[in-house]
Image (tube, rainbow, N blue to C red):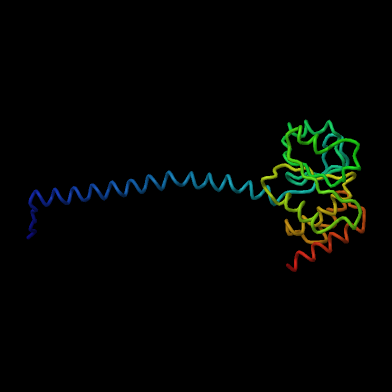
Amino acid sequence: MIQYIEFPLGKAGFFSQSWTIMLRAWLFLLIFSLNALPWASAQVAQEAPAEAEASELRLEKCELGHATPVHRFGNVYLAGQPAEEDFPKLKSDGMRTIINLRPDKELPWDEGAAVKRAGMKYVHVPFRGEEQLTSSVFDKVLGVLRDKESGPTLLHCGSANRVGAIWYAHRILNDDLNPVEAELEAKQVGLRDAGYLEKAKEYVETEKVK
């Protein structure tokens, strides 16, 4: 014989209200989870290309006004001497920082003034000859190249010979590239002076043991 248990109306109403609250809570969690999934997927989709792009950077030839030779690696341009009239165009194209490795006496015009007139940041770290390629020179230039706030940057000298020496140290110390590949890139950029390369290697070894 089946017996039916009857609850008073007040208790039945209490249980009904409790189940309603629980169902609403579960529905809220379900809707929140479903809405969060596309957002999370979008975040991964946005971050993945940036990571892939960073790993796919390559040193490549390009053109930059009157300068020659010119190579590009991401936002860094490595070049010989640009012309005075190139700087306004570089600014309009998005260049933010100019690093000049040449002493003032090598140019018949004021590069610093031209760069500042164009509205870009000017960093002057001059050296000429192995004896002037000191650790201070490397420290200053590598610091600028390492700083993301520098934005698109042009590093230049007269023919990219001096640029190549700096690039060798930068790629090993800032980018963790192996020395063999770093030397190949430096020579591709324009490094020809064996003395500059030796100074760059000495600097790298000194910095590694710090």
**In the displayed structure image, the side of residue 104 where residue 96 appears, left or right:** left
Q: Picture coordinates of residue 203 (x, y %)? A: 81, 62
| Left or right: 120, with 157 as reference point | left
Q: Quadrant of residue 155?
A: top right
The reply, left or right, for residue 39 in relation to residue 177 is left
Residue 189, image x and y in percent? Answer: 85, 49
| Residue closer to the observer: 43 or 104 | 104
Q: Quadrant of the N terminus?
A: bottom left
> Residue at the spot x=84%, y=34% of the render?
65
Residue 13: horizontal and vertical position, in percent? 14, 48
Residue 31, percent from left and from top: 37, 44
User: What number of labels is visible?
Assistant: 0
| Quadrant in which the C terminus is drawn | bottom right
Instruction: Identify which residue, 125 or 172, lies in the foreground.
Output: 125
User: Which residue occupies the foreground of this view, 16 or 195?
Assistant: 195
The residue that appears at 89% across and 52% down in the rendered structure is: 191
Picture layout, residue 141 above or below residue 88: below
Residue toward you, 73 or 141: 141
Choose top left, top right, bottom left or bottom right for residue 34: top left
| Residue that sits furthest to the bottom in the current view | 209
Answer above or below: position of 87 versus 99: above
Choose top left, top right, bottom left or bottom right for residue 108: top right
